[in-house]
Amino acid sequence: MRVDIPAFYEGLNGYDIYTGSRSTTGLVENDLTTRYCMRSLYQRIYAGFIPKNPKSWNKRYFKNVILSLGYIGIINTDIYGKIPQISQPSGELGLYLQPTKLIVSQPLVKFEGVIGEDCELIMLTPDWQGVLDICEFYAKRLSIAFTSLDVALVNSRAAVIAVGKNKSATETIKALYEKLSAGQPLLIHDKQLKDESLDGKSEPIWTYSLDVKQNYIVTDILEDIQTIIDQFDREIGIAAIGEKKERMITDEVSQLTEDSCARSETWFDCLTESYDKVNELFPDLNLSFTLKYGGEMHTYGEKLNESEGTANGTS
């Protein structure tokens, strides 16, 4: 069973998995900028999840599978012992319409077991989803913004339109502009170019100067890029204040922080529930994790607020 997530070394190298199985129809598709933004945003989430696993487990594999696929199976094998593996939920649905079995079909591991009896799941979200859709949602917008920035930077250099009398004059203008762009401080051209005229009266070179400063939008685009990044950070739990008001009161800052924690608290609660089940079935593993959100480190085992189901306090 092959799953296109960055658990495989080639996926980690190129992140082509983001443009292979996911659609970016209608926007920037399969380009370098989009892949760069996907990698950057994904790694911001990756840095906030810190699992504590047995030394024999590959931490990168474990984190990438959970974050990208949304869940990972913990199975007990005769050869390798208790290990995490990319798994396929299967079997008849149980009382609460959830899968009852796990199947692993990897080159070195073949396994089929009953969830809760000889295997368990660690899940990031209640809906069996990872974080790639979040990264893609913002990466497409960042890609468009960066493309607009590149265009604006190039356009800001074009301050003059010049028209030559003939091909010779046009080539002269091009040569002069190339030297000017290269930083040459003194430019000299043939006097004949000035003496010739387009109609016997006007100069042979007609120019139109653009108001670059008035049309300079690079600063605005940079602010837009930062706004998109701030929105992404708030969604994944990084407390981003964004464009701070002059008199932003404490309650407003607290509200922004609470908003940024909503999704991360869901992740924390779902991971906690999963870790409880794994540690109950395989107590010798003694798994734990730390999730950073809201500017604080939250560790598995924190007391939960029973009325809200969210973590209370920090470690």
Image (cartoon, rainbow, N blue to C red):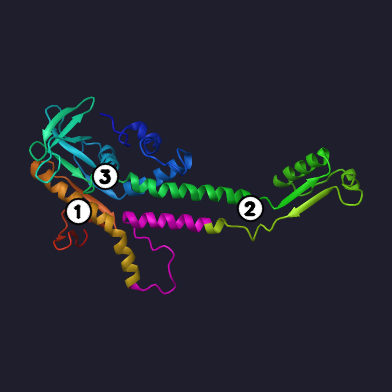
Residues drawn in magenta = 221-250
Crowding near the residue tagged with mark 1, few <14, some 14–19, many ≥20 C-alpha atoms within 10 Å: many
Q: Secondary structure at mark 2?
A: loop
Q: Which residue is mark 2?
A: 156
Front residue of 77/222: it is 222
Q: Are marks 1 and 2 in contact (CB under 8 Å)?
A: no
Residue 275 point in image, percent of width and height? 15, 47
Q: Earlier in the sequence, mark 1 or mark 2?
A: 2
Q: Answer left or right for 66 relative to 277.
A: right
Q: Are marks 2 and 3 in contact (CB under 8 Å)?
A: no
Q: Secondary structure at mark 3?
A: loop
Disc 3 residue type (three-letter) = Gln
Q: Answer left or right for 291 relative to 303.
A: right
Crowding near the residue tagged with mark 2, few <14, some 14–19, many ≥20 C-alpha atoms within 10 Å: some
Q: Where does the N terminus fall, quadrant-wise?
A: top left
Specify whether residue 244 is painted magenta: yes
Give the CA separation, mark 1 to mark 2: 50 Å
The label on residue 157 is none
Q: Nearer the viewer, mark 3 or mark 1?
A: 3
Q: Earlier in the sequence, mark 2 or mark 3?
A: 3
Q: Quadrant of residue 250?
A: bottom left
Disc 2 residue type (three-letter) = Ser
Q: Residue at x 44, y 73 (%)?
A: 246
Residue 170 point in image, percent of width and height? 79, 41
Disc 1 residue type (three-letter) = Asp
Q: Residue at x 87, y 44 (%)?
A: 193
Give the CA separation, mark 2 to mark 3: 43 Å
User: Would residue 233 be visible to someone looking at this image?
Assistant: yes
Q: Which residue is mark 3?
A: 129
Q: Where does the C terminus fall, quadrant-wise?
A: bottom left
Against 295, is 286 above or below? above
Q: Secondary structure at mark 1?
A: helix
